[in-house]
Image: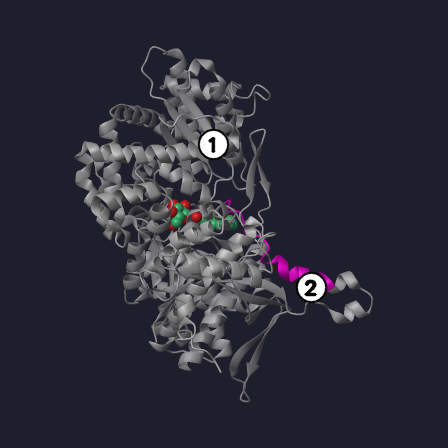
Amino acid sequence: MTLAPNSELLRPILHNSDPKTLATEILKSLTYRLGKDTSVATPHDWLTASIKVVRDRIIERWIESTKSAYEQKEKRVYYLSLEFLIGRLMRDAFSNIGMLDNMREALALLGVELDVIAKLEPDAALGNGGLGRLAACFMESMATVDVPAHGYGIRYVHGLFRQEFSDGWQVELPETWLDHGNPWEFERRERSFEVGFGGTVESVTSKDGRLERHVWKPSERVLAVAYDTPVVGWRGERVNTLRLWSAMPVDPILLEAFNAGDHIGAMRESNKAEVLTQVLYPADSHLAGQELRLRQEYFFSAASLEDIVQRHLSQYGELLSLPDKAAIHLNDTHPAVAVAELMRQLMDAHGIDFDTAWDLTKRTFAYTNHTLLPEALESWPVPLFERLLPRHMQIVYAINAQVLLEARAAQKFDGEQIGRISLIHEGSDRRVRMGNLAFAGSHSINGVSALHTDLMKETVFADLHRLYPGRINNKTNGITPRRWLIQCNAGLTNLAREAIGDAFLDDVNLLSGLDPLADDAAFREKFAAVKRANKQRLSSLVGERLGIKVDPSALFDIQIKRIHEYKRQLLNIVEAVALYDQIRSHPEKDWEPRVKFFGGKAAPSYHNAKLIIKLANDVARVINRDPAVRGLLKIVFIPNYNVSLAEIMVPAADLSEQISTAGMEASGTGNMKFALNGAITIGTLDGANVEIKERVGDDNIVIFGLTAAEVAERRANGYKPRDIIEGSPELAQALSAIASGVFSHDDPDRYRDLINGIYDNDWFMVAADFDAFTAAQRKVDSIWRNSPEWQAKAIRNVARVGWFSSDRTIRQYASEIWNVPV
Ligand code: 26V
């Protein structure tokens, strides 16, 4: 007999979630699931036991969601992403399902503090930065706005490395999030697929000699095993699935070898398979043709596609309706090989002809581009691609032939333009261009902010856009207000509830009700008190972790993000050095106390990024110790920046640093998080900053620097940074101090090359924007001096950025790209 999930037998247990019942269940969970007694239970055991109790409630809704998607024949969204930067899940899930307070009480009855065990949950850091965090926000929003969706990715055993500083240098250590097991996931051994690599392609011909189909005979096979994690939407109405694939050997032991006495050799296959999903690639925007990375991309794309096609076939019995029932989304080009894989499955496994398969493929796929940096656009050497995926190589050539035919037929492209449209970069180093493959195989290609989308049309995809006009569209990024306001900033959430009621919890746009309160002195004071408490929390963390004392009444100026030259942490540090110089040489002036916080990881092989971290730490050491500074300026670089640290830093910020070289940051999402938490942005007209400015108004943001068009113009017309530096004494002074070893007595030449790079080339326009940045910072000081004015602007930021909710973004994807109802 099977028990229906909503059976009356289950209901009384699952629907009773008062603290006492929960406490009993936590004890039962501890005893019967973990096999522990309270006297020996570790804090981790309490955590696991608690999660499993709530998980039971989630599972019930999960099964209901899955069933209803099936019964209602709903179109499903499949979000393919090599990264999901989830962070901790406990607070998110408990709060979304409405059980956070009762669980806290239940644990208290057992003498356990929820906030203490919550900190033991490891961050699931299965991503590098913005792209991965966006995927996590999207998963939560899809469940919230009721889109039936599956996320697909890789269950990396080691996520993004843990960062420590040794003498100010970044050291990378392995990250081990699975050490205590993962109570959220369900291993689905029964849901596994074989994924092939290498080998040969055979053509099968009919009796009359006609080519019937191709058969790929891979030389290697790996098993992809599914691990499912439920994703709970706000109010717990829908629960979607994040399915992560883990690689296993098809044959765990080569028995023949083992029996012949080769015990180690017999295991080798197994290690080879498992290596595939061992570790996340740390993004450094340079791939240099790493084979393992292409293997990861194909591994998870192929397993996901098999899963999708099987699900569709088992429900509908045919594949011609695939585009009506499945929307497959490519999060950047990392899963772009899925385009060729779907073609392969449709043609080789299901006997569909090329033209029909190509039409189905294009109507099923959509692709998001997340960066225009040329070095980050993926392409694979043809010989590597051909060796690993011989059948896909043939399919890419066939697709390319079709695309080039259409390009020539359009009669508006010259040879060079046709060359740029081609899926193959020709020349001595022939490569498969994954962006072009994703573009050709999708009906929708979107950018992640208005500016970025315009630039996509003008630069990387200019020719493809002319060939297939109407495919490129914009979907400005968003963030989930559950994690990035309700959970991380209880103080502000409660203040807003008191002031405007609870409706904004379901529609964050309603924070607009706070707008008039910017002029209410009493409200401003309460708002300032909340910020102050958040700053106190960050100060304690810094005190505990780093032994640095910071004053919560100082202006908290924060730049947290991956370390990259285009994000210009260097500009920020050089400005700090200039300010340091000013404070020392003009002690009579009325300086506003400031703490500059940094956080972020550098890719292990990115030399300049690592040097910038060392510089920040060197500068911090000198400034923080100098009595002449009188505590007016402090610099704090907090190691191991991750989602959980962001949840503490974002609510504590007064000033949000969003200072990328215009045209280079596709969108940014940190900018949105800070504004929603009442920080004022100092930023360039880049990415989503442009749209934040439009929404908060020019008076409530501090914009400086060159525009994207001006940056392009300077680069085209011979930019001379040396002349600019010579005309700016403050900049010249700061640069020469750094270059001459003022901050690096132990190795005076340490920063010579880095600083010479600014004199000689300065691709990122540090010199060009320096004076504007300094002036903008002094403008920030003058606003800060007038506290009511500052608070009013900060409140208006909170009130006006509800539009940047990922719920809005997802609704736009749903109606304008995926064609699913919302
Ligand atoms: C590139 C590579 C290449 C080497 C191997 C690993 C790897 C991983 C990721 C990437 C590309 C990262 C692109 C990215 O994260 N873009 C960011 O996307 C955010 C969400 O749309 C956006 O807000 C940021 O502006 C954009 O930089």
Compared across the picture, whether 340 is left or right of 795 comes to right
Find the magenta span and give its range.
Answer: 267-284
- Three-letter amino acid code at disc 1? Val
Question: To which residue does mark 2 refer?
Answer: 269
Residue 656 picture location, percent across and down? 35, 35
Question: Residue 467 in magenta?
Answer: no
Residue situated in front as seen by the camera: 6 or 315: 6
Residue situated in front as seen by the camera: 486 or 103: 103
Residue 802 picture location, percent across and down? 26, 48
Residue situated in front as seen by the camera: 671 or 49: 49
Q: Which residue appears at 54% of the width and 58% of the height?
A: 155
**Disc 1 element:** helix
Q: Nearer the viewer, mark 2 or mark 1?
A: 1
Question: To which residue does mark 1 refer?
Answer: 542
Measure the C-alpha gap from mark 2 to mark 1: 46 Å
**Quadrant of res 580:** top left
Residue situated in front as seen by the camera: 186 or 574: 186
**Disc 2 element:** helix
Compared across the picture, whether 50 is left or right of 770 comes to right
Classify mark 1 as within 8 Å of ligand 1 or not, answering yes or no: no
**Quadrant of res 320:** bottom left
